[in-house]
Amino acid sequence: MPVHPYSRNLHTVGQLRAMERAALAALGISGPELMRRAALAALNSLRRRWPQVRQICIHCGPGNNGGDGFLLGVLAREAGLQVEVVALTGASHGDAAAARAAWEAGGGRIRQWDAQGHLPEAELHVDALYGIGLNRAPEAAAAQLIEAINGSGRPVLALDVPSGLDTDSGSCPGAAIRADATVTFIAGKRGLYTGRAVDQAGAVELATLGVPDSVYADVSPDAQLLAAEALPPRHRHANKGNYGHVLVVGGDHGMAGAVRLAGESALRAGAGLVSVATRAGHVSALNAARPELMAHGIDGPQALASLLERASVLALGPGLGQAAWGHALWLTALEADKPLVLDADGLNLLAREPRRFGAAAVLTPHPGEAARLLGVATAAVEQDRFAAARELARRHGAVVVLKGAGSLVADPDGRLDVCPWGNPGMASGGMGDLLTGIVAALLAQGCSAWQAACLGVGLHARAGDCAARHGERGLLAGDLLVPLRALGNGMAESGFEHE
Ligand SMILES: NC(=O)C1=CN([C@@H]2O[C@H](COP(=O)(O)OP(=O)(O)OC[C@H]3O[C@@H](n4cnc5c(N)ncnc54)[C@H](O)[C@@H]3O)[C@@H](O)[C@H]2O)[C@@H](O)CC1
Ligand SMILES: [K+]
């Protein structure tokens, strides 16, 4: 299937409402006709994904999302499926009322959901409870229905968005459907790809319902999905001086692994030279393990000065600690005013002593580090990852990578990209150190902070997906180094599709 030219664009609910109106005008059709197209797209998706299913149960809410469900019932029955419909409320409003009437006019029965009730037997459940109109946590009866569907052990197809998910933020104010797949209508929604959404939405498929390109072209998206872009080409006459010199600063006592992983990933991502400034006790082990890394024992800031002079990019923070040694190196490194990636304790020190960055800077916080930087609870960051990433980028004058499922890349100018790759195997020690090294290597090869962060996040996540072919559980950061090199050279595909 050809990829829709605007399929990477992600929108807010406000934008989606405006696009819906523009679509109706451009197509010259009515709301119910657009709803019929949505139902048809849902039926096609259902039959393609679950061709063996003969018996379905559609759960309809009070609004137009429920309307999509009623019309899906009509079309599915015409296609020969056995259809049960459960309604959350006694009446529907707007276009959904007509859709409900169409289902009943064809002899369709509606079971009213009551909290003590049981789900009808079905091979598959369709979630048409709430779409982009969700405006509060589902109340008791709806929450019980959602839990019953989630607990049914049957596959679930969500229409437009999984019910209970906040379409703008990707968070869930209460109970939420856990779908195997979501067929989303007209345009991409930013809340489907990050944080909790990654678990709730399953595989997301965009159905554009024949809406013409002009409708998309007229709206600048709030965010975009990362593209799997190639790294900058290397020239045949290149020498190691062309690809920069990364200096990794960190590795306090007991934390040699962090600098080794950051250094090694910088090399595998194509940095010309990589030096490591760390505790003297780590040097011989680093040399033995990876002789290509130039490891230097540093007892204090004076010893760092000459290394800083030679470096073109800094990777500051892996295993740095926040004690006197780490703090002194942190201050000296920041004074060098070089392009840098700041991670781990480099970020925790920044939370203690905030500043804005002059040179190109990429900050790579996980939600806990982001919360410390913003002075809020981690849950508040997760409630609106978009707002948190944008606020950090604005405050610090730096590109911010907010890690976690569906990593976000935010630029101080407001641009934001969402990473559709990665897997829960990557929730393990050392993965962040690897990302730091990759982004630093890309800065060293001449990328801007924005490019380095976007390319680096994409490369890291896709390498993680390649490595996870042998299983997510037990995935080690070091397992990513081989696929990282292959992907960086355009030699392997991740085998993971986001659509
Ligand atoms: N208007 C259009 O052109 C199209 C709309 N479509 C569908 O319409 C949906 C949007 O429809 P609506 O705007 O009617 O909104 P929804 O159907 O998403 O739900 C809103 C309804 O649920 C109620 N509600 C919201 N949160 C609730 C909660 N927590 N507990 C109880 N009630 C709650 C609202 O008061 C309202 O009645 C889209 O997601 C999509 O599925 C599609 O049919 C495509 C075309
Ligand atoms: K839904």
Image (cartoon, rainbow, N blue to C red):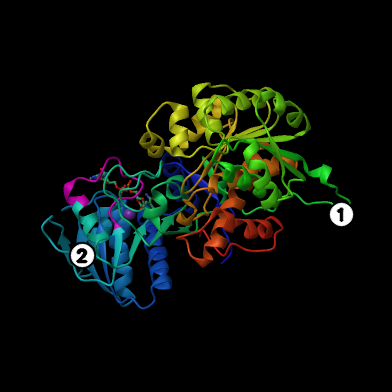
Q: Secondary structure at mark 2?
A: helix
Q: Is residue 269 visible?
A: no
User: Which region is colored magenta?
Assistant: 128-143
Q: Which residue, given by chain and number where applicable, does mark 2 sit on?
A: 104
Q: Nearer the viewer, residue 141 or 371?
A: 371
Left or right side of 149 for 31: right
Q: Amino acid at mark 2?
A: Glu
Quadrant for residue 356, please give it. top right
Which amino acid does the dot numbered 1 rest on? Arg
Residue placed at 50% from the left, 50% from the top? 26
Residue hosting label 1: 236
Q: Residue furthest left?
A: 116
Q: Is residue 403 magenta?
A: no
Mark 2 Cα shell of 10 Å, populated few (<14), some (14-19), many (≥20) = some
Between residue 65 and residue 301, name the one nearer to us. 301
Q: Position of residue 256 (x, y in %)?
A: 59, 43
Q: Is residue 49 left or right of residue 417?
A: left
**Mark 1, residues whose alpha carbon is within 10 Å: few (<14), some, or many (≥20)?**
few
